[in-house]
Image (spheres, helix red, strand yellow):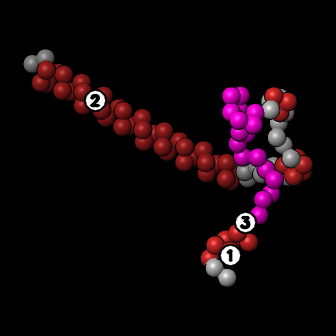
Amino acid sequence: MTRREKREDAWEDDGRTIVNMNVEGMPGYRRELDGKQAVSSQDKNRPKEMLTPRETRMVMLASMKWAFLYSMGFVVILVLFILFCVKVWFA
């Protein structure tokens, strides 16, 4: 058995639509599928995955850390620009 045959055997289609490729102007376009959502019965029966309160706090803390880091970067750039203006440009 070659590597290619192993790969083909391991692949399994679960029937979910990742991207709807029914676009007007493309070959094979079907107008009747435009308004329909491509939701399979498997997706309807699948329970929604929710974050635990601890995971939610971790995500919020991480996003606040990055927001603080970026805002401090902008503040440092602004202070350096003001110092440059006062000491060099307007002197």
Q: Residue 79 carries which label?
A: 2
> Dot 2, how many residues are within 10 Å of its Cα: few (below 14), some (14-19), or many (20+)?
few
- Determine which residue is flagged by label 1: 6
Earlier along the polypeptide chain: callout 3 or callout 1? Answer: 1
* Residue type indicated by callout 1: Lys
Label 3 is placed on what type of residue? Answer: Trp
Q: Distance between the residues labelled 3 and 1?
A: 9 Å
Task: Please give the range of residues in magenta.
Answer: 12-29
**Figure quadrant of the N terminus:** bottom right
The image shows residue 14, relative to residue 38, as above or below, that is below
Residue 11 sits in quarter = bottom right
Residue closest to the far bottom: 1
Q: Residue 64 carries which label?
A: none
Select label 3 or label 2 by which is in front: 3
Left or right of 36, for residue 81? left
What residue does disc 3 label? 11
Q: Which of 13 and 64 is in front in this view?
A: 13
**Residue at the image point whose x is 61% and y is 51% from the top:** 58
Question: Looking at numbered disc 2 in the image, what kind of residue is underneath it?
Answer: Val
Q: In the rendered structure, which disc, 3 or 2, sits on the residue that comes first in sequence?
A: 3
Residue 77 appears anywhere in the view: yes
Give how far across and how far down residue 19 sits, in percent: 70, 42
Residue 52 horizontal/vertical position (percent): 73, 53
Secondary structure found at label 2: helix
User: In the rendered view, does 90 fall on the left or right side of 40?
Assistant: left
